[in-house]
Structures are given as structure tokens and as C-alpha cells.
Image (spheres, rainbow, N blue to C red):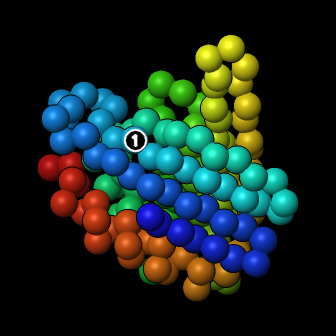
């Protein structure tokens, strides 16, 4: 599990890479839980592990340089998360998690938060350690 936790924000992700589906544009299942300023939701996201790898690389670059963005999004749904930073060490996250039920109802949490860059280090490093091997060539 990958966890980013601050005073008023928490993001947890559990990833399952489906190695047998590597040729598919969706080969990784993420279970994502978000709690932001008292609002919370949990949902699945289906992504390409190569995109997750690129996200991890960019997230580490963002942590080191405090420039740019790191974005991960579902190719066939509205789920995404995007990190950005400023030169003062403030990291911003915004995103959307959604879940559809068998009854046709959709629940969606659109979230945004900001925190100090020090909270990002472990989360970014752990993602990179596990997913760098899937980098696009």
C-alpha cells in the first residue's frame, strides 16, 4: 500500500498489475481511497502500468525540483489525480475518484488540497521503487 498522509488529507493506493494483460491499455487496477477536509471516498481506477511508472517518475521530479506536474488518469473514465508544486515547497493535489454501482448510480468525489513537500517524499519514492521497471522505452 502507498500512503500519503497530512493533517487534513490522506491518499491510499493499492496496485495490482495484471502482467498477462501488458498489451492492453488498461492492465493495472488501483484501489484508491481519499480523505480530504472531512470528505472521503474509495474507488477503483484502471490504468496502464507504464502510465503509473511515468507518474512515479514525474512525482519524484516534482518533489526534487518543485516544478511541473504529475498526473495519472484513467483512459476510459473520469478518475484522475494531479500533483503540482510551487517554489516555496507547497504541493497541491487535485483529483476525482468515482464509483458506479450495478443499479446505475455513480458517486463521485472531486477533491483538492495543499500540503508541504516533506509529506510527499516517502509516497513518491515508494511508487518509483516499485514501478520504475515499467517505464516506457
| Residue situated in front as seen by the camera: 37 or 132 | 37
How far from the left and from the top, in percent, is residue 83?
58, 60
How far from the left and from the top, in percent, is residue 41?
70, 47
The residue under the point 55% across, 61% down is: 12
How far from the left and from the top, in percent, is residue 64?
45, 80
Label 1 belongs to which residue? 29
| Residue situated in front as seen by the camera: 16 or 126 | 16
| Residue situated in front as seen by the camera: 129 or 117 | 129
The image shows residue 136, relative to residue 91, as above or below, that is above
The image shows residue 10, relative to residue 63, as above or below, that is above
On the question of residue 59 being in view, the answer is: no
Q: Residues within 10 Å of mark 1 (few under 14, many from 20)?
A: some
Along the horizontal axis of the image, is 23 left or right of 34?
A: left
The residue under the point 68% across, 14% down is: 103
How far from the left and from the top, in percent, is residue 67?
53, 70
Q: Quadrant of the N terminus?
A: bottom left
| Helix, strand or loop under label 1 | strand
Q: Quadrant of residue 135?
A: bottom left
Along the horizontal axis of the image, is 66 left or right of 50?
A: right
The residue under the point 46% across, 80% down is: 122
| Residue situated in front as seen by the camera: 67 or 21 | 21
The residue under the point 74% across, 42% down is: 109
Amino acid at each position: 500500500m502507498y500512503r500519503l498522509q497530512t493533517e487534513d488529507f490522506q491518499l491510499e493506493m493499492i496496485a495490482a498489475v495484471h502482467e498477462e494483460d501488458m498489451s492492453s491499455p488498461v492492465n493495472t487496477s488501483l484501489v484508491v481511497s481519499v480523505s480530504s477536509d472531512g470528505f472521503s471516498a474509495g474507488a477503483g481506477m484502471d490504468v496502464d502500468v507504464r502510465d503509473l511508472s511515468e507518474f512515479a517518475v514525474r512525482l519524484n521530479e516534482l518533489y526534487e525540483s518543485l516544478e511541473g506536474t504529475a498526473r495519472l488518469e484513467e483512459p476510459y473514465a473520469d478518475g484522475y489525480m494531479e500533483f503540482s508544486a510551487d517554489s516555496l515547497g507547497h504541493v497541491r493535489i487535485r483529483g476525482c475518484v468515482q464509483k458506479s454501482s450495478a443499479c446505475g448510480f455513480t458517486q463521485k468525489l472531486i477533491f483538492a488540497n495543499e500540503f508541504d513537500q516533506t509529506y510527499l517524499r516517502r509516497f513518491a519514492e515508494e511508487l518509483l521503487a516499485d514501478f520504475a521497471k515499467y517505464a516506457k522505452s
